[in-house]
Image (cartoon, rainbow, N blue to C red):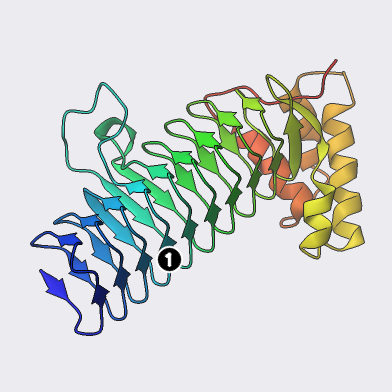
Amino acid sequence: MTISETAQIHPTAVIEAGAAIGDKVQIGAFSVIGPEVTLDNGVKIGAHVVIAGETHIGAETEVYPFASLGSAPQDLKFKGEKTRLEIGKKVQIREHATMNPGTEGGGGLTRVGDNCLFMVGTHVAHDCMVGSNVIAANNATLAGHVEVGDFTVLGGMCGVHQFVRIGAHAMVGGMTGVAHDVIPYGSVMGNRAHLAGLNMVGMKRRGFDRPQIHALRAAYRAVFDDTEGSLHERASVVAATLEEGGAAREMIDFILAGGSRRFCVPEQ
């Protein structure tokens, strides 16, 4: 067990042998830190938090009371194999949030990027790959093997199906069930999510310039408003007109890369 002399640990907290506690870490009352947990410098752990398994939490991340991180995945195929949970720097994890490590069948790793906010009751399941600057509102939940791109916003009480990919800068509306892939910069909503256009509010907030936005709009219309050929065929035609880089190219590359799920498309 390695505990920095500058760490502040409440006397009722339990730090199991083998844990690594960095400089200026704060651990609140009645929290339990498992033997394979690493807390980097400046991490703050509130009261009644449980951190288990091989879990690594990046510098200056703050975990609020009653969160549970690193406990065994909710997957009946999990048989206790050695897997990991990695959480980035300056992440806020609010009350009652839960995050599980990976499974052997899914690569053995669940990862959350930097500067994210997970509000009350959110869930990140096994083998998820979550980017940086992601916001998950209250009770948003990710099933296993989900990929979420940078700067995505997940609305309150939304649910994302296993193996779904959500592209960067996307917006998922509150109470939306996402069963299919969401394009980068897309905005989806509904009982079973349909594509409701582009996340223009998010793009403007993040300083995307007019040429990028116009190019993305044109590519979106060519792919989703046209009815000739398949979605993949239309995306291939658009790809031939685009240079490398930019939001439009990112969206088209995401479509052409494909995944194990279909795509969210506009309502017919």
Number of numbered discs visible in the structure rendering: 1
Mark 1 nearby-residue class (10 Å; few <14, some 14–19, many ≥20)? many
Q: Give how far across and how far down residue 54 sits, in percent.
A: 22, 52
Out of 191 and 29, give the one closest to the viewer. 29
- Name the image quarter holding residue 150: bottom right
Q: Amino acid at mark 1?
A: Thr
Out of 127 and 97, give the one closest to the viewer. 97
- Name the image quarter holding residue 221: top right
Specify whether 139 is left or right of 127.
Answer: right
**At 88% across and 50% down in the image, what residue appears?**
215
Determine whether 134 is above or below 127 in the image: below
Quarter of the image containing the N terminus? bottom left
Specify whether 267 is left or right of 49.
Answer: right
Q: Give how far across and how far down residue 14 sits, in percent.
A: 16, 59
**At 76% across and 19% down in the image, what residue appears?**
230
Q: Give how far across and how far down residue 259 sits, in percent.
A: 55, 29
Out of 10 and 94, give the one closest to the viewer. 10
Q: Give how far across and how far down residue 203 sits, in percent.
A: 79, 55
Quarter of the image containing the C terminus? top right
Determine whether 154 is above or below 116 in the image: above
**At 42% across and 72% down in the image, what residue appears?**
60
- Name the image quarter holding residue 171: top right
**At 64% across and 43% down in the image, what residue appears?**
167
Determine whether 164 is above or below 151 in the image: above
Which residue lies under the disc numbered 1? 61
Give the SS element for disc 1.
loop
